[in-house]
Amino acid sequence: MSSKFPCRVPKALVVADPEPSFRRICREAANRLTHTIEVFQEAESIHQTIALAKAHPDAMVFLDPTIGSPQATKNHPQTILLKLRNAGHTGPIVICTRHASVHRAMKYIRAGASDV
């Protein structure tokens, strides 16, 4: 049975989150998908995230927008997303945050996030 909307499982996953426990959970989940996830990378800063996104432009990125600076989302919520897209990242970016609102989610989507 073919789908009208085919699902593309990424070959690479980048988890950019300051919480080691969240990165560990993602690593364990990725290990269960060994037939699809070829590369799993963790980032603890925005600079690492951008470098990894450049190295794997079609990777799925799980991103906590407060990575590196809690002030990042208060001043310019979409700054990190724009930096990733401007760096040539074309893969899906999923925002993982505890500070979600519809208004903020719309800003992330407009800036290039795939999901919030």
Image: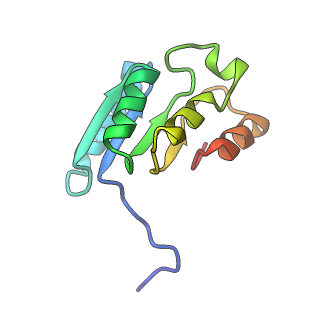
Say which residue appears at 39% left-offset and 33% top-offset: 15
Coordinates of residue 108 in the picture (x, y in percent): 66, 39
- Left or right of 49? Residue 100 is right
The x, y position of residue 86, in whole percent, is 53, 39
Would you identify the image quadrant in which residue 107 lies?
A: top right
Residue plotted at (79% across, 37% down): 103
Q: Determine if residue 14 is in view.
A: no
Pick whichever, 67 or 1, lies toward us: 67
Q: How many marks?
A: 0
Which quarter of the image is occupied by the C terminus?
top right
- The answer to whether residue 76 is above or below residue 30 is above
Give the quarter of the image for residue 52.
top left
In the image: residue 84, left or right of residue 102: left
The answer to whether residue 4 is above or below residue 52 is: below
Considering depth in this image, is 2 or 52 the residue closer to the camera?
52
Position of the N terminus by quadrant: bottom left
Identify which residue is drawn at 76% across, 40% down: 102
